[in-house]
Image (cartoon, rainbow, N blue to C red):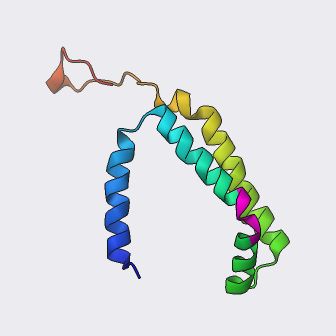
Amino acid sequence: MTSMTEVFAQQVVFAKKLRTSTLASRIEILKKLDFVVRRRQEEILDCLQFDFSKAPTETLLTEVLPLLSELDFCLRHLKSWMKPKKVATPLLLLGQEAK
């Protein structure tokens, strides 16, 4: 079994890698997550019912559907979020350009 420390270390490495990822790779990751959630929806409902005694309908309405909605929102807006933006340059760096 993987320890929490190892999981956290893996997440730190992945977060650094994700900062330099392309639009296409981020879209692929989001689409994979959407696919897995949809494919394993029944398992998710069963697990939350077993672990937290949460009714499947409640889980669907409060956990699964909002997640799928957020994934769709992210997929629609990711391209514009990734566009470089000019930002104000501090006086110490006058004459330079910041993005």
Q: Which residues are magenta?
A: 38-42
**Residue sticking out furthest to the right:** 57
For the C terminus, the image quarter is top left
| Residue at 34 percent of width and 47 percent of height | 17
Q: Toward the viewer: 91 or 28?
A: 28
| Residue at 26 percent of width and 24 percent of height | 89
Is 31 drawn above or below residue 24 in the view shown?
Answer: below
The percent position of residue 81, horizontal first and vertical second, equals: 51, 32
Q: Toward the viewer: 90 or 58?
A: 58
Task: Name the side, left or right, on which 87 lies relative to 40.
Answer: left
Q: Is residue 99 magenta?
A: no
Q: Answer with the quarter of the image where residue 13 lies.
A: bottom left
Q: Answer with the quarter of the image where residue 87 lies.
A: top left
| Residue at 67 percent of width and 52 percent of height | 35
Is 86 drawn above or below residue 50 in the view shown?
Answer: above
| Residue at 80 percent of width and 63 percent of height | 61
Q: Answer with the quarter of the image where residue 80 lies.
A: top right
The percent position of residue 75, horizontal first and vertical second, equals: 62, 38
For the N terminus, the image quarter is bottom left
The percent position of residue 38, horizontal first and vertical second, equals: 73, 57
